Image: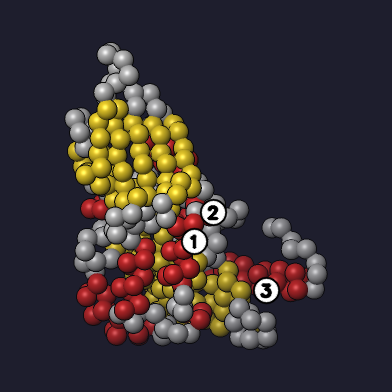
Amino acid sequence: MVSKIDQIYKTQPVGKDHLLPSCIGFGMLDARRTRIEPPEDKSGEPILNVSYVTREGDLVYKVRLEKEFCYVEEFFEGRLISGAKSTTLKKAFTQNFLCWSSNPRFRKMIDKIMRDRNVSLVRPGQYGFRSVFFPEGLIFFLRLPVVPYDRMAEIEPKLRDISSHVFIDGIYGGEVIASGQGLVTHYFARFIDFIATLWNLEETLDLIFEQGLVPLYPQMGLYILDPADAVPGSFKVYLGEEGTKMEAYGHLLDRPGDIDVIQAQELIMSGIHQMKRVKNGQPAQLN
């Protein structure tokens, strides 16, 4: 299996003078279904029809490339679920990807990969929008906190075993900061960032869990992040159970551009305050 992003999304020639990505979103190019139609008028350009399919061969996308427009249709379980039209393939697919939250294939995949696993799909961004990419569709950072700090010695051989099959973006120092019961606790940690796309997200998670990299402790599970929430300077506050030592917590990485410990603690305390306001029937305060 090859799953390095730059290798997955290399272009392939299809027909005369056409280069198309090997994979787009959920689909892999199926050269057997490629058809070139003559133009409607003699002075026009040929019309290219291509299909993208799942690993099992089920149709995902139909693409029709004309001189001035590109048409994209997406299928799920044999039925048409969405479509888009634009001047380029990239623009048409980007329009289609913007409907990711209601996409039944995406929701089915997420339900499957999270079932009986210590995985959190983190709501992206301030307004819940995910970053959209072409041809990947969606890119995910899979962040694994490693606590205690010296557990890396146990994990490193397993990472080497899967390093040719998954994309590891980086391993960083840092800490898990938790607040609850009037106390703030700092757990020194390492953080492993994997990267996956729609095409190989399920496969990547399967490999990570098969290696036993993810512990059962809920706050130390695998976190699926939008790229905008994984870059230096970003900081997510996670809410736990009220009355415990982890009423709220966050992952503070030690990278250039990341916030400092004081700022992280203030954000966590604000998260607890907001949680209590909502529980008491008061509206959350906007920062």
Amino acid of disc 3: Ile
Residue 91 visible somewhere in the drawing: no
Colour pattern? secondary structure
Q: Secondary structure at mark 2?
A: helix
**Point 27% across, 13% down: residue:** 42
Q: CA distance from mark 2 to mark 1?
A: 7 Å
Q: Is residue 285 above or below residue 85?
A: below
Label 2 close to label 1 by CB (< 8 Å): yes
Name the disc covering residue 107, or none.
1
Q: Which residue is mark 3?
A: 272
Pointer 3: residues within 10 angstroms few (<14), some, or many (20+)?
many
Q: Secondary structure at mark 3?
A: helix
Left or right of 277? Residue 94 is left
Amino acid of disc 2: Ser
Left or right of 121? Residue 161 is left
Q: CA distance from mark 3 to mark 1?
A: 30 Å
Quadrant for the N terminus in the image? bottom left
Q: Residue furthest top?
A: 43
- Nearest the eye: 165 or 261: 165
Position of residue 141 measured from the top left corner of the image (x, y, whole percent): 41, 62
Name the disc covering residue 102, or none.
2
Q: Is residue 241 above or below residue 193?
A: below
